[in-house]
Image: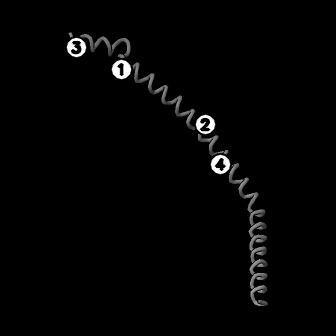
């Protein structure tokens, strides 16, 4: 009896396992497509962030130079005031 059921399943309609497997494979393909699309969006966003960051590099260098100069002047004034005391 089991041999008859197996042969009729193989010859005719796909088994429940094959149907479920096909459905799962289709779902996986669909979700992988969504994942690839989201990764591409993430990559574009990261590239935008890097570009914005590089635009501020020159400004950051200017502020760093200003900060170093300001503290150097403050230290020079402090040493001069200590020398005069």
Task: Give the mark, 3 or 4, whose residue is nearer the N terminus.
Answer: 3
Separation of disc 4 and disc 1 at Cα? 42 Å
Separation of disc 2 and disc 1 at Cα? 30 Å
Residue that mark 3 sits on: 3
Residue that mark 4 sits on: 46
Q: Are discs 4 and 2 less than 8 Å apart at CB?
A: no
Task: Give the mark, 2 or 3, whose residue is nearer the N terminus.
Answer: 3
**Local crowd size for mark 4, using a 10 Å CA cut-off: few (<14), some (14–19), many (≥20):** few
Mark number, residue 17: 1
Q: Residue at x 74, y 80 (%)?
A: 75
Q: What element carries label 1?
A: helix
**Local crowd size for mark 1, using a 10 Å CA cut-off: few (<14), some (14–19), many (≥20):** few
Depth check, mark 3 against mark 1: the one in front is 1
Task: Give the mark, 3 or 1, whose residue is nearer the N terminus.
Answer: 3
Q: In which quarter of the image is residue 2?
A: top left
Q: Which residue is drawn at 43% across and 23% down?
A: 22
Q: Is mark 4 on a helix, strand or loop?
A: helix
Q: What element carries label 2?
A: helix
């Amino acid at each position: 009896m089991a041999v008859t059921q197996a042969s009729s399943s193989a010859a005719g309609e796909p088994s429940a396992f094959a149907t479920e497997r096909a459905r799962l494979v289709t779902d996986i393909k669909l979700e992988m497509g969504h994942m690839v699309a989201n990764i591409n969006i993430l990559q574009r966003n990261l590239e935008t962030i890097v570009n914005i960051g590089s635009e501020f590099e020159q400004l950051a260098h200017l502020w760093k130079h200003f900060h170093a100069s300001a503290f150097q002047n403050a230290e020079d004034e402090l040493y001069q005031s200590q020398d005069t005391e």
